[in-house]
Image (tube, coloured by chain):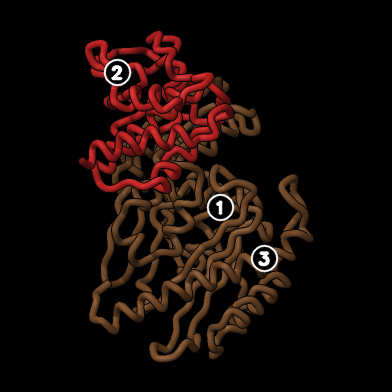
Amino acid sequence: MQYNISVTVNGTKHHLKVAGNTTLLNVLRECLGLTGTKEGCGSGDCGACTVILDGKAVKSCLYLAVDTDGKEVLTVEGLSRNGELDPLQIAFVEEGAVQCGYCTPGMLMSAKALLDRADGAGLGEEDVRHAIVGNLCRCTGYKRIVKAVLRVAQHREA
Amino acid sequence: MFPEFNYYKPSTINEAFELMATLSDARFIAGGTDLLLKLRKQQVLVKNILSLKDISELREISESDQGLSIGAMATLADLEFHPSVRANYAVLHDGIVNLGSMQIRNMATIGGNLCSGLPSADTAAPLLSLDAKLEITGPEEDYSLPLSDFFVKPGKNVLKRNEILKRIIIPAQSACSTGAYVKLGRRKAMEIAIVGAAVSFVTDGLTDHCVQARVALTSSAPVPMRCPEAERYLIERRLTEEAILEAGKIAAVEAQPRTSFRTSSEYRKNIIPVVVKRAGLMALERLKLCKSQAVRGWNR
């Protein structure tokens, strides 16, 4: 069976026909060509597939496309505006929070979801670590990632 | 990629029943973090999936003088950020924040966690320690039963194929009763418990003598379990570290852990008292804080 869905991705509404067993990750990468979201494990463990769905971070490899009908998705491609990087992306670059880059899109989306939910309220290191606990990084040891997120959080608070 | 299946999204419980009656080889799905993984690994094969996500009455959370009513489709994140859960049902909050990760909790539901029937379900021990009851609905009848009667064996609960877990009801807790859940794992998150312990106390208000205790374990038996002997030991005793540890040792005797690839049954038997002690001491600290706030006239 095929299902009609209407999903907004990075501000653009898409009308798509998807199979019941198609994941959101499949739709983003294969149908829409948004390959920033990665498949690291396909089993909801690594977090490389993290996107923001209706304001909440989810693992797109375990989210069925058919359930995104009427919803809004933000991927890493949607972070930059008019060619300018989001403050989170700038912080990741400047703090050295990117090595191989494979976890980075997922990390950015988990961090963005945290910052948007906190809405400037004082965030500490534990809050950031709690938010990214579902995102595995084999390269950085997480310290610079946490530093980058805290930098943006403190700037927002100010 | 998952095997092919047909996907249905009923918007009411009755619609779900009607669909289930017409479809052979069909299952209900909640958040999907468990079932979809099983489908991917082909541990389960099913032709028709009926999603409960669009049935809004299954997601309602409400609090009254009688206690907390949680719709089975409430996500774990709904509960994590619910002010009453954190303030008044701390042991449940502990179980929730120890489960998976933020992304998983945004997708997974409390009903799905219980219906998985896994002995490691992190909301199970806290809910057992809170004397939770379940409301179940089926085409023929609605009924309720204590959570302790819900689990049959690993991965199996009492629900018939066409029944739906509707609500989890937590009775109102005594003033200044509190609990805590501690999960031991190889990792801090995204982990199945080696052992989890939920410990709750009610004291007599003036001293640290226990008038009611609950000790519940995950990953310590074929199903999440209460430890009635450990609980009985604590009644009328002064709650000290030694008493709580002794209760943990009794709980370890009651437990029937298995050897899995995570660890051996011997290790689990040995570590249960430690995890019970940690949870008990955390509960005791919360109780002290609660009492000091009550003395100062702070309302809960």
Relative image position of residue B81 (x, y in whole percent): 33, 51
Give residue B272's mark: 3
User: Who's the residue at 63% across and 29% down the image?
Assistant: B41
Q: B223 left or right of A82?
A: right
Inspect this view and state whether residue B156 appears. Answer: no
Amino acid bearing label 2: Leu
Query: x, y (%) of residue B25?
Result: 56, 32
Residue highlighted by disc 1: B121
Circle count: 3
Q: Measure how far apart labels 1 and 3 are at the Cα level.
A: 16 Å
Quadrant of residue B176 in the image? bottom left
| A30 vs B41, nearest the viewer | A30
| Dot 1 and dot 3 within a common chain | yes
- Which of the numbered marks, if any, corresponds to residue A85? 2
Q: Residue at x 41, y 28 (%)?
A: A95
Look at 41% across and 59% down and name the residue there: B168
Relative to the observer, which residue lies in front, B198 or B245?
Answer: B245
Find residue B33 and report its horizontal and vertical position in percent: 50, 37
Residue type indicated by callout 1: Ala
Q: Which chain, by letter, is red?
A: A
Q: Amino acid at mark 3?
A: Ile
Report the chain shown in brown. B
State whether discs 3 and 2 lie on one chain: no
